[in-house]
Image (spheres, helix red, strand yellow):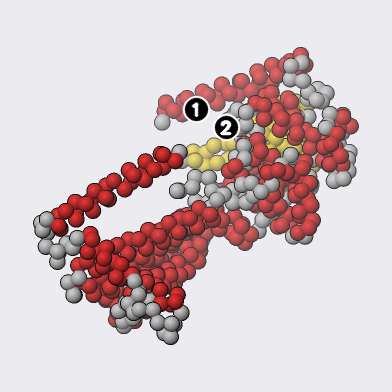
Amino acid sequence: MSMHTASMHPAAVEALAERAMPVIAPAAPHILIEGVDKRFVVPGGEIVALKDIDLTINRGEFVCLLGPSGCGKSTLLNAIAGFSAPTQGTIAVEKRKVTAPGPDRGMVFQEYALFPWMSVAANIAFGLEIKGMKRAEIDARVAELLAMLKLTEFRDRFPKDLSGGMRQRVAIARVLALDSPVMLMDEPFGALDALTRRSLQDELIRIWAATGKTIVFVTHSIEESIYLADRIVVLTYRPGTIKQDIRVELPRPRDSASAAFNELKRELGALVTAEQHRFEAVEVKGLTTD
Amino acid sequence: MHTSRLKSAAEGLAVPVAAIVLWQLACSLGLVNPMVLPSPAAVAVRWWAYLAPIEPFDPAAGSYLAWLFSGEMIQDSIGSLTRVALGFFVGAGLALPLGLFMGSSDTIYRHINPLMQVLRPIPPIAYIPLSILWFGLGNAPAVFLIAIGAFFPVLMNTIAGVRHVDGIYIRAARSLGASRLTIFRRVILPAATPYILSGARIGIGTAFIVVIVAEMIAVNNGLGFRILEAREYFWSDKIIAGMLTIGILGLGIDMAVSRLNSHLLRWHRGLES
């Protein structure tokens, strides 16, 4: 953890230090996925979205699920979140079997999913109100999160008046508010421009380093996965299986222009492109036969 | 900016002014029978007479304000608006909870929807004979008819609003730990308000149409009653003056509701203007 903390903004470290979780031995399994299959029934057949997925994610790990469209990475994330149960196999978080969504696994969506009728502050407070926290405590917590994500001056705005990057900051703050040990992120920066994306990636790394959360991050960007992850899990196109599980040993902050970074990018590129070709072959065939 | 506003006002007024001038010319030149079509000037005079208090101000009889509002038109408008408000609150008050239930439960929807689909195409006016049979004459049948007019737009839009709530909000709320009741109260209900409010706007519009008809048959005041009464005396100028008042009032109500909606939906992205 010290390696990550060194890369942090001093102010952010200070803001987060009070609530930082105790650093737990990094090898403790946090999310355990065993023999997971997910099949969808569609007209005229069945789609095998996931097949034989075995994956152990350790506490405090930053894992990226990488693959082309249709490889089942979001399906796997939704199964961990508890939105849709696997057809076969089990997923356990903190040794408890996942059966429904819950605040122990915060979810950040690509479409932000902010409640448009609530102000920024009300969105962040929502989960805390459900928890039954006292008003004064909620206000203090919201103020802290607004400051952490540089949202203080936007606290009374409605989501429609914010840029995409700002909205995603609010969505992250809303999940952080509950202090869930696991943060699930479904292509959260996919709709943002390159500069906003990079600044949010840096922010996420800082938050992760300070809070010690376990993060499962879905992306189709090879570059993004190398920039962020401890571990990159490459999935195959239908059926979704684990093609490769790669540990990223590059020191942080990572330099996307470095030779080592690009070496890894090339290696992953070959893996993902092969799956992309299979995806295109199937989609084109699908189009011609329909 | 200023000139363009003046210009657009001038553009908006050109056609109505031209129409009134032509209408006045046709009357002044004796092209039409004033009994059939009175001149705009005659209508204006009559409209003013309809608006103004009948008795001269007498401090002994009551306050100045009460006297100012004692004109026939104001009394009729108050009568009509009260009926609209009563009928709307009864109709919408029944439609809203029913719509919320039907929208959120497929079972309830499947049981009730066929009946609603059969009743919905029946215009409120077709209920007139039944309403008189049930409620006699007076305010009760009028409120009943108006309630029916307001009921269906609010019901249909509430169902649609609840059913069209984007699933992602529900997923987000669930992952934040919200219970089903909390999701209903704090996610589904607010997410459905744009639909519900547009249903309410249509419902109020329908209520305003129905009140005029209801007053023609069931009561002896209100704007609808007044224009029918004027016909019996061949006061065509008063008929048109009354219609004018109905138009102005209807426009005013719609503008007020639309303002209220914009305020309530200030968070909403694609706001209808």
Query: Which chain is mark 2 on?
Result: A
Q: Is the residue marked by circle 1 packed among few (<14), some (14-19), or many (20+) residues within 10 Å? A: few
Quarter occupied by residue B154? bottom left
Q: Quadrant of the N terminus of chain A?
A: top right
Q: Is residue B14 above or below residue A64?
A: below
Question: SS of the residue at dot 2?
Answer: loop
Amino acid type assigned to the residue bearing label 2 in the image: Gly
The residue furthest top is A259
Residue B170 location, x and y as percent? Answer: 60, 51
Residues at marks 2 and 1 touching, judged by CB atoms closer than 8 Å = yes
Q: Tell me what residue is drawn at x 43 percent, y 85 percent.
A: B60
Query: In front: A120, or A25?
Result: A120
Residue, x 67% and y 52% (percent of image)? A122
The residue tagged 2 is A70
Labels 2 and 1 positioned on one and the same chain? yes
The foreground one among A212 and A269 is: A212
State how far apart marks 2 and 1 are (Cα): 10 Å
* Lateral position of residue A283 relative to residue B211, left or right: right
**Sequence-first tag of 2 and 1:** 2
x, y (%) of residue B95? 45, 66
Label 1 residue SS: helix
Residue A210 placement, left or right of A192: right
Query: Closer to the camera, A119 or A237?
Result: A119
Residue at 60% in and 24% down: A275
Above or below for B228 versus A20: below
The residue labelled by disc 1 is: A283
